[in-house]
Image (cartoon, helix red, strand yellow):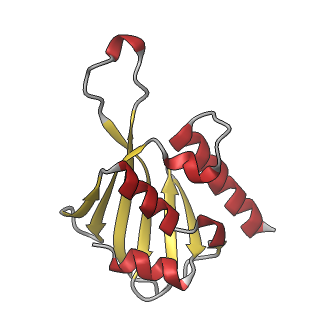
Amino acid sequence: MRSVFMFFLLLVSVSLILMGCSDENWEDSFDKTEKIEVTQSGESETIAEITDKQKIKEFINSLNVNKWNSKELPEDAIEDKKYKMYQGDTTKLLEKGKDKELNEVADITTYKNVPYINFNFKGISFSFEVPADVDKFLLEYK
């Protein structure tokens, strides 16, 4: 029951923050994501950056969020990469044409030795066991 609640809370939270109020599918909830930044754990240097809308969509689709299982992160988990998701503030009528600042709205941390991720959203952290294909995709992404 707890895992169902956590998964539901994750989907609702991500949908509301990254998409706003809409009647689109949850897969489209990342439409406002404008940048995904990849860093190695413990380092600040960016090893990859995704800004192309199509590549962001492909990245999000590869996560297979529907197959994540809410589980407690094992104590022996060793951090590997962090994927930071950014979006811009909503453009207001009088601000059209101005560059908008991107804000980090969520991040995903991967682990080297276990197929788990940690999803952080506005200071709330969720741990999930992910399918082998998602784990491999995230660990090998460059």
Tell me where residue 33 appears, x and y as whole percent: 42, 46
Viewer-proximal residue among 26 and 108:
26
Q: Is residue 77 left or right of residue 73?
A: left
Against 19, residue 84 (above or below) is below
Residue located 65% across and 48% down the image: 25
- The quarter of the picture where residue 8 lies is bottom right
- The quarter of the picture where residue 95 lies is top left
Q: Quadrant of the N terminus?
A: bottom right
Q: Quadrant of the C terminus?
A: bottom left
**Among all residues in the image, which is located at the extreme front?**
54
Tell me where residue 102 appears, x and y as whole percent: 32, 39
Q: Is residue 73 left or right of residue 139?
A: right
Residue located 59% across and 65% down the image: 65
Q: Is residue 131 left or right of residue 90?
A: right
Viewer-proximal residue among 51 and 70:
51
**Among all residues in the image, which is located at the extreme left?**
45
